[in-house]
Image (cartoon, rainbow, N blue to C red):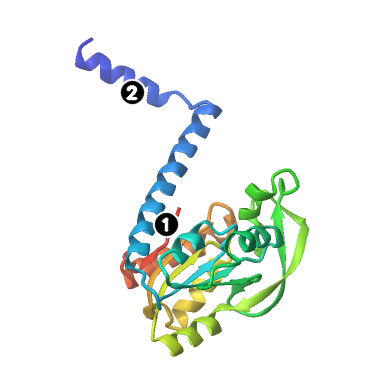
Amino acid sequence: MDKPDKQARRAARKQQPLTEDERKARRRAKRNLRHAEAMGFLKGVTAMLRPGDLALDCGANVGVVSSLLADTGADVISYEPDPYAFAQLSDALGDRQNVQLINAAVGASSGNVRLMRASNFDEDKKGASVKSTIVDGGRMIAAENYVDVKLLDFLTILSGEIENRGEIAFVKMDIEGAELELLEAMDAADLIKDIRCLVVETHERKFAELRPRFRALREAFSEKYPVRQVNLDWI
């Protein structure tokens, strides 16, 4: 087959709509690639951490990342609001001397909030617990299925730790939409400059109404912070 025929066949394939299975396969491949990149980035982070450093894991879930951070000897504080996930986290890391586990959400204020769970939580608690959120309007969230949880003012936490230690070595943030308001507030309070490395999984695909604010945040952060310090594409 000559080159023009190959090009014509490729063009024809591009014009054909993807099947649902093909779309799912593409999304799965992209997720796997993002996960591999994130774990590679985390490997570099753990190589730089030392005993005496402080690492904060916001949205620790069952402790996969917290465990890797703890293995470095750094001091680790893990925040997880979902009672189910926190029980698994406690089983995994409750006996680690350099790890503090806190059953609470983090945000730009303090108080008590509703933690809403995924629509499939009752069928798959472990898989669905990663989607639990304190932000209204999330895709595939059953707002009526919620638990009341404590909300901690993360700005106050950061300020106190920075005052005590001079800097925070690492912050990982995967808090299902609540990262938007919190990152805006951290930037406004000029706290990010004292964090050596901050990685965030953003959730604009889950919260359609918040997408313009997420775009504005990304644009502002890309101009202000180097990607080696602030990575908004964590997984």
Looking at this view, name the residue that lies furthest to the right.
144
| Residue at left offset 40%, top offset 66% | 72
- Residue 216 appears in the figure: no
Q: Horizontal and vertical percent for residue 227?
A: 33, 64
Quadrant, the N terminus: top left
Between 150 and 222, which is closer to the camera in this rendering? 150
Between 165 and 189, which is closer to the camera in this rendering? 165
| Residue at left offset 76%, top offset 63% | 147
Between 194 and 12, which is closer to the camera in this rendering? 194
Identify the mark at residue 94; answer none if there is no mark: none
**Left or right of 51, for residue 156:** right
Quadrant of res 148 = bottom right
| Residue at left offset 52%, top offset 56% | 64
The amino acid type found where label 1 is placed reads Asp
Q: CA distance from mark 1 to mark 2?
A: 32 Å
**Left or right of 136, for residue 97:** left
Q: Secondary structure at mark 2?
A: helix
Q: Horizontal and vertical percent for residue 31?
A: 46, 44
Identify the mark at residue 11; answer none if there is no mark: 2
Identify the mark at residue 233; answer none if there is no mark: 1
Between 225 and 97, which is closer to the camera in this rendering? 97
Looking at this view, name the residue that lies furthest to the left.
2
